[in-house]
Image (tube, helix red, strand yellow):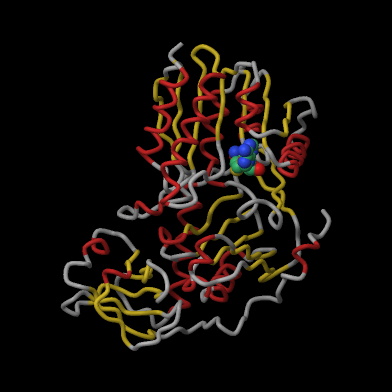
Amino acid sequence: MDANRADADRRRPAAGAASVHSKPTVAGRVRLLPGRERPLRAGNPWLFSQAIAAVEPPGLAAGDLVEVSDAAGLLLGFGHYNPTTTIAVRLFCRSGNPANFAELVEDRLARALAARRALVRDDTDCYRLVNAEADGLAGVIVDRYADVAVVQFLTAGADRMRELVVNALTRLIAPRAVLERSRGAVRREEGLDDRQALLAGEELEEVVVRENGLTLCVAVRRGQKTGYFLDQRENRALFAGLARNARVLDCFCYAGGFTLAALAGGARSVTAVDSSALALSWAQRNLALNAYSAQAATLVRARAERFLAESGESFELVVLDPPPLARSRSARRSAARLYTELNRLALARLAPYGLLMTFSCSTHVAGDDFVHAVAEAQAQSGRYARLLRRLGPAPDHPVLLGHPEGQYLTGLLLAATD
Ligand code: SAH
């Protein structure tokens, strides 16, 4: 549990940066071109710059709060503006007056918390508490790991909510620590640098949590994203239920979420593959935390494509959960081919009537595009499959109906026909 020295110089004192304003006022107005309010009315919170007729006053800054109206001047709502991005406004509220912005933010957090309390099982104390637009807090992610909150402010508008979010979290769940890990392509597009900082509470490296009754140690400072992939929780539970007596392969295992689920479900053997030595060390530690011996699973450091191509073994249950293979819209075609190739290799490893749980977490290869990419793999591998179930993220990762851009995780549970 050494302190991560590389990050030490990036630590900042608690919230309160100068740009944070707790009482933002509406800084300007955005009026749309005729008819361009339709997507907003249909439920999409994003307003693209081509839809805009006029912005007043000139010189509004990224993150300013604006009032949005249709061409006739009818109020549509309030949102955060960015003059430099193609998503010009992210709608924050459709009605009402955002004059008491702090109250609005706290109310949204309270509602998000109440929803999670209803949705998340008692044997789990880690979940996504706020999923950006779908929780009425565009650009804000809050992942809860027991008594620790890891937050991301991904847009210029979200970046200004830092202090409000931390204050509201403190009042609602009194976390031991609030850690910020804001990074990635969206922030760069919004003109923001990566930011990692302790915003409140004590310095810590790791947190022990419970997921589906299993114990996990989450590296909240050094792990990927906010430390763990909470979106797969319900798919891991489903996986556990399929694992009895199976020889299981967990490709892209990270800290061993699916591996632990398979062992808990009574797998005969588990092989877990990841290219990261650090991820495998976390998987190893998580096995030990659940009293599994070091031999309970075979952890393999390898590129999954290579392992699949070279392993002569077959498995009754395989999971493929790769990192996003399409980082941009333009990379979509080539990414679809990568998914086809990966799934071709995985289908070839399935025992007769074996099961494959396969995922894409690329927004650009989601839904039916992913189904097509995987279907293509059957013809190439000569292994045909039945679709048992389409999968998605757990319901603590909601998306707004009318906002397909918010969907990113698509999964398929397939059964080989023979
Ligand atoms: N299944 C995991 C999450 C996977 S995240 C879970 O349930 O939590 C993606 C993982 O893929 C990361 O751990 C990363 O280290 C690993 N990775 C990236 N490229 C890889 C490759 N080519 N082969 C194997 N692992 C890879």
Whether residue 98 sits left or right of residue 248 in the image: it is left
Q: Residue at 51% across / 82% down in the picture?
A: 22
Whether residue 115 sits left or right of residue 45 in the image: it is right
Q: Position of residue 66 (x, y in %)?
A: 36, 79
Q: Position of residue 49 (x, y in %)?
A: 32, 70
Q: Residue at 37% across / 38% down in the picture?
A: 369
Q: Residue at 47% across / 46% down in the picture?
A: 362
Q: Position of residue 82 (x, y in %)?
A: 41, 74
Q: Position of residue 267 (x, y in %)?
A: 64, 21
- Between 325 and 8, which is closer to the camera in this rendering? 325
- Between 47 and 216, which is closer to the camera in this rendering? 47
Task: Dividing the image into four quarters, tell me where ligand 1 lies.
Answer: top right
Farthest residue to the bottom: give it: 57
Farthest residue to the right: give it: 2
Work out whether residue 123 can be spotted. Answer: no
Q: Residue at 44% across / 31% down in the picture?
A: 412
Above or below residue 372? Residue 145 is below
Whether residue 61 sits left or right of residue 122 in the image: it is left
Above or below residue 27? Residue 7 is above
Count of all numbered marks drawn on residues in the image = 0
Work out whether residue 4 can be spotted. Answer: yes
